Image (cartoon, rainbow, N blue to C red):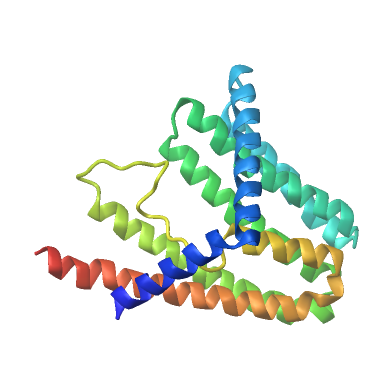
Amino acid sequence: MLSKLKATTKAMISHLRDNEAGRKLAKMREEWRCLVNSVGRRFYEWDVSANLVTFTGFAIGMLAVNFLAMEMYLAALLCILINRFFDALDGAIARCKAITSFGVFLDATLDYIFYAGVIFGFALAFPAQNAVGACFLMFGFTASACAMLAYAVVAFQNHRDGSRCLEQSPFYLGGLAQGSETLVAMIVLCIVPDWFLPIAIILGCWCLVKALTVITAAYYNFVIAAKGNN
């Protein structure tokens, strides 16, 4: 069953890459990656630390909470986009020197706080209208975050005697409800804030599915795969 699922996933990815739209999207991503890496190298030459960029991006991103509460959605969107750019930039700077354990921790922690803050900001804008959706989205977000963090703890313990590559972390799980989907949702919400309730419910369900996939991956890696290696 698992092998069939992997084969189907690979076939879908291959089809998307062969598709014209898929090739354009891949080209745009590569151009964006080159731009961020180029800016990151320049900041590294200026002796700007990755952690400073992380803190700066977080501070700017948290301004979005205030703007959302004041219903200044374009200003909030600008802060969100700057935060996401800085989130990519700090990694590019770190790769010029060395990616540190504390840098990875700081980046992930401030990301979780930022996302939660944006949800809180939308709730502050219209408490009566958005409170239930915000609570449900926070429920799904917390479930997903806790599952991934708990997975990372166990994975770290299992790999503590071996070498770990922080740039290609074995503790990171791809899939649903990652940064790109969340960013798209935040952009749409800032443009059409009246859609908060349905989008919050959809994204909250997506986060719950993400939590379930992490639990499934944990069972496979920590139980089934562990038995196979013994």
- Is 200 located above or below residue 96 in the figure? below
Residue 187: x and y in percent read 77, 61
Query: Considering only vertical position in the picture, is 37 above or below 162?
Result: above
Relative to residue 208, is residue 6 drawn left or right? left
Which residue is found at the position 71% from the left and 43% from the top?
Answer: 59
Query: Which quadrant of the rendered structure holds the N terminus?
Result: bottom left
Image quadrant of residue 139? Answer: bottom right
149 in relation to 213, above or below: above
Toward which corner of the image does residue 206 lie, by quadrant? bottom right
Q: Where's residue 43, x and y in %? A: 64, 24
Residue 28 in picture, x, y percent from top left: 66, 48
User: Does residue 189 appear left or right of residue 113 in this picture?
Assistant: right
Residue 79 rendering spot, x and y as whole percentages: 78, 48
Q: Judge left or right: residue 10 versus residue 155.
A: right
Q: Nearer the viewer, residue 75 or 93?
A: 93
User: Between residues 33 and 41, which one lies in front from this camera angle?
Assistant: 33
